[in-house]
């Protein structure tokens, strides 16, 4: 401890505080570990209204999930022609949800699933339009999507009702879940970090050169053989 500090009128408390700050960082992990063990076994800290500080921090790692959108459509066919159109709509969505088979050849004749490759299911473009067919600027935009779930319910009221003549359902409920395959991004102006990335690469390269030069300077060579000498 510097005695001149006391002679010059410096507060001793500040000096002690400074000394404590120097060892606080080194002992912080030990103190946290000890406190956690004590509280885990006895619950003393929790009983006094204290909790161990885990020093948590939130870091941004980029988007992790694609957005999903759910839609429900109800159909009430009035005649046989309407029922056939509903059937076509359901079949088209089913085909658009399932993967396709490809490869140009069939390994086993008559077995469709023996084709060598699967192709990605259909991609869907969803737009919200106004009455005249123009895009509606007040509704949100949906990126290119695929269907991840499809549900068909012919008895939404827990009672199956069929047309007597054709046997087609009186009411059909169709539920679809779309998942976007593109990530939406903000329209805010982004930060130009190209210069920072170049600086980081330059610093890393320079550090590697400095390390190599230091190793060369610290290595002793045999003047006769020119080979590094082992200490």
Image (cartoon, helix red, strand yellow):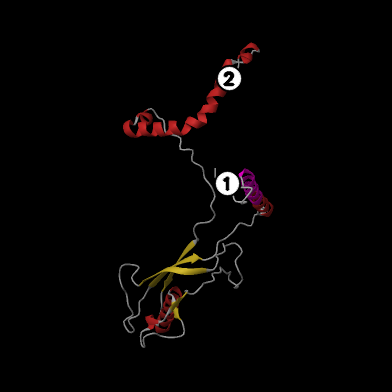
The residue shown at (60%, 14%) is 3
Residue span colored magenta: 204-219
- Relative placement, left or right, of 70 versus 227 is left
* Residue 136 x/y as whole percent: 60, 66
Q: Residue furthest right?
A: 195
Query: Secondary structure beneath disc 1?
Result: loop
| Image mark for residue 229 | 1
Q: How many marks?
A: 2
| Image mark for residue 57 | none
| Image mark for residue 15 | 2
- For mark 1, does the 10 Å Cα neighbourhood hold few (<14), some (14 to 19), or many (20 or more) residues? few
Q: Nearer the viewer, mark 2 or mark 1?
A: 1
* Residue 154 x/y as whole percent: 35, 72
The residue shown at (41%, 34%) is 33
- Relative placement, left or right, of 54 versus 1 is left
Quadrant placement of the C terminus: top right
Q: Nearer the viewer, residue 160 or 38?
A: 38
- For mark 2, does the 10 Å Cα neighbourhood hold few (<14), some (14 to 19), or many (20 or more) residues? some
* Residue 18 x/y as whole percent: 57, 23
Give residue 131's quadrant in the image.
bottom right
The residue shown at (44%, 86%) is 105
Query: Magenta region's main secondary structure?
Result: helix
């Amino acid at each position: 401890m510097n005695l001149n500090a006391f002679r010059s009128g410096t507060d001793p408390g500040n000096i002690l505080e400074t000394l404590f700050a120097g060892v606080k960082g080194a002992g912080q992990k030990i103190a946290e570990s000890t406190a956690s063990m004590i509280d885990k076994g006895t619950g003393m800290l929790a009983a006094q209204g204290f909790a161990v500080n885990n020093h948590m921090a939130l870091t941004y790692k980029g988007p992790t999930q694609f957005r999903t959108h759910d839609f429900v459509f109800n159909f009430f066919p009035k005649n046989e022609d309407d029922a056939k159109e509903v059937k076509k709509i359901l079949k088209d969505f089913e085909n658009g949800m399932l993967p396709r088979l490809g490869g140009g050849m069939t390994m086993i004749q008559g077995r469709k699933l023996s084709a060598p490759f699967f192709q990605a299911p259909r991609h869907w473009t969803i737009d919200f339009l106004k009455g005249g067919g123009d895009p509606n600027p007040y509704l949100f935009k949906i990126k290119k999507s695929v269907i991840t779930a499809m549900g068909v319910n012919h008895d939404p009221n827990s009672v199956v009702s069929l047309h007597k003549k054709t046997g087609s359902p009186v009411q059909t409920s169709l539920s679809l879940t779309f998942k976007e395959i593109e990530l939406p991004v903000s329209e805010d102006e982004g930060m130009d970090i190209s210069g920072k990335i170049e600086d980081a690469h330059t610093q890393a390269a320079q550090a590697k050169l400095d390390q190599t030069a230091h190793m060369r300077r610290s290595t002793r060579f045999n003047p006769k053989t020119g080979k590094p000498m082992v200490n």
